[in-house]
Image: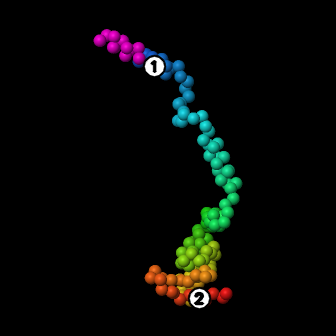
Amino acid sequence: MSSSSENRKKASTTTTSSSSTTTSKPPAAYASKRDWDTIEREVETELEKEKPEGEEALNKLFKDIYARSDPETRRAMNKSFQTSGGTVLSTNWGEVAKADYEDKEQRQAPAGMVWKDWEGNKLPQKESGD
């Protein structure tokens, strides 16, 4: 039994001696030596350089407008888009506050389309000028 206690003592002294020889630098969180902050900045600059095309570009434009706008403009964009069924997007709250996009006389579907209810019945709408 004395040999096993001697082995434990040797193991404990080995552990303490190896820990005292290490530097005061804390262990790295990751095994890799990469600077993740630099990589993140590089990815962000690459994404900024990319130019979206088509519908993606249009959606990005609307997102940028919404992100940089004041609360009144955001409210105008939300109300005009939601109440018109997605046919109007306005940033002018003075105009949108007065407009009733759900009014039967003001309702207008995009060119070539018709307003219908959930059952498929055609709804009255303003006649287009084309």
* Mark drawn on residue 126: 2
Q: Residues within 10 Å of mark 1 (few under 14, many from 20)?
A: few
Q: Residue 114's spot in the image, x, y percent?
A: 56, 83
Q: Is residue 130 above or below residue 57?
A: below
Question: Residue 91, can we see it?
Answer: yes
Mark 1: secondary structure:
helix
Question: Residue 99, can we see it?
Answer: no
Of callouts 2 and 1, the N-terminal one: 1
> In the rendered image, which quarter is residue 73 located in?
bottom right
Q: Residue 83's spot in the image, x, y percent?
A: 54, 78
Q: Is residue 108 above or below residue 47?
A: below
* Residue 99 relative to residue 16: left or right: right
Cα distance between the residues tagged 2 and 1: 86 Å
Q: Which residues are magenta?
A: 1-11
Q: Residue 28's spot in the image, x, y percent?
A: 54, 33
Task: Tell me, yes or no, whether the highlighted magenta stretch contains residue 120.
Answer: no
Which amino acid, by three-letter code, is at mark 1?
A: Thr
Q: Is residue 130 above or below residue 45?
A: below
Which amino acid, by three-letter code, is at mark 2?
A: Lys
* Mark drawn on residue 16: 1
Q: Is residue 3 above or below residue 80?
A: above
Farthest-out residue, left: 1
> In the rendered image, which quarter is residue 127 located in?
bottom right
Residue at 62% in and 46% down: 40
Overall secondary structure of the magenta stretch?
helix
Residue at 29% in and 12% down: 1
